[in-house]
Image (cartoon, helix red, strand yellow):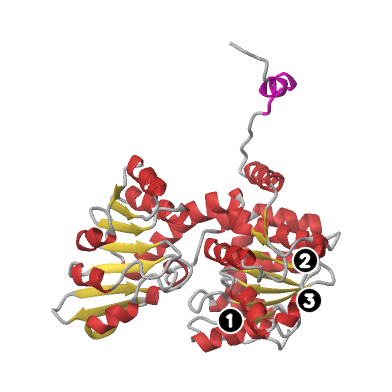
Amino acid sequence: MSNNYKVADIGLAESGKLKIEWAEARMPVLMALREKYIATQPLKGHRIAGCLHVTKETAVLIRTLRAAGAEISWSGCNPLSTSDEIAAALAAEGISIYAWHGLSVDEFYWCIDRTLDFKPTLTLDDGADLITRVHTKFPELAEIIYGGTEETTTGVHRLRAMAAAGKLLYPVLAINDAETKWEFDNVYGTGQSSLDGILRATSVLLAGKNFVVGGYGHCGRGVADRAKGMGAHVAATEIDAIAALKATLEGVRVMKMDEAAAWGDIFITATGMKDIIVGRHFDAMRDGAIICNTGHYDCEINLPDLEARARSKRTIRDNLEEYILQDGRRIYIIGQGRLVNLAAAEGHPSEVMDMSFANQFLGMVHMAEKGKSLEATVHDIPRKQDLELATLKLATMGVAIDALTEEQVAYADNYLEGT
């Protein structure tokens, strides 16, 4: 066992191992890639620093990267998203890991810095905190880094802004923008796991509740769909006219947050933007309103505004805090305003993370092979990779699809074909 780790309790390793095995049985695409690449060792000689939620699914990815030859050092990408059992299991397997549930901000960055101590040649990120740390504190490391990958919408947005400003020092693959990631992980994964977090933290009945979703992107749409399926009355808030129109035509009521604040029973933010729910919204909310966030950072709900209005605060149950306002109304916050699906539940189901992490794995292989020849900007996943992963996923599910005949292929490109 490596001594290069810091976790909450190494004694939790055995129960973590069982959960990892459970996930492996439900991630056939990633397991197939492990079997394929264990012989060729495309990552041999590479050191990967990872900053991504420490879940059982992430452990399957780490094991696969290691099987392909990589050395690994890992930290969590959110103070509340680490499963201590999984972190312990990985440490027991010799993985250099610095992660535990309930990190302070200082501890969070200390953990990231420890993953950079072994001078990585590749970075794997979720939210761009690791890449940002390289650029702001350890820019000399960029000289030996072949490239990186970024998992989530917020991180990709930040990296594109960095590249546009000419500040990005090495190439990064936008894993989030692969269709086999955002169309499944963001929609179905976020939808199910966010509601899972709400129910674990509150045990409330969703049927009949007024349920407000801040943002109707892929994540917000997934949450809205599942809330509707549970019998909630769903409304969405938006700044984008096209997204608002989609919501309207999909049976979701669209309103401004100023209006929704007085209407809703349960609120969830899914935008990646700060100050979606602020002081004036708390002022308008009903007694007993429940609020949570499923965006990457905890700034979507302005908790200082809520603190300023509260005369008392107490923990009611795990991951649920009650704020009693000056007028006696009660406001409930899940998971300190951090990602509800990871702070209060286990994150996305293994089956949907199978494709996302298959993209991460192939992204690492691509960067190991091509990174040094790529421009220092944000690159898209090839369409061919998306199609190959979708085809493999369907095969593992026992689903077959049709293929065009040669005649049909010719017809599709025949611009002279008429009525």
Residue name at image x 59 percent, y 54 percent = 177
Residue 232 visible within the image: no
Question: Residues at badges 1 and 2 in contact (C-beta under 8 Å)?
Answer: no
Instruction: Check if mark 2's residue and mark 3's residue have beta carbons within 8 Å.
Output: no
**Residue 188 at what x, y percent from top left?**
48, 52
Residue to which mark 2 is pinned: 67
Crowd class of label 1 (few under 14; some 14 to 19; many from 20; radius 10 Å): many
Q: Which residue is mark 3?
A: 143
The one of 397 and 105 positioned closer to us in this rendering:
105
Q: Nearer the viewer, residue 234 or 241?
A: 241
User: x, y (%) of residue 132?
Assistant: 61, 76
Q: Is residue 166 left or right of residue 325?
A: right
- At 57% from the left edge and 81% from the top edge, which residue is drawn? 12
Q: Secondary structure at mark 2?
A: helix
Q: Which residues are magenta?
A: 403-414
- Distance of mark 2 from mark 3, alpha carbons? 26 Å
Real-space Cα distance between discs 1 and 3? 27 Å
N-terminal-most mark, 1 or 2: 2
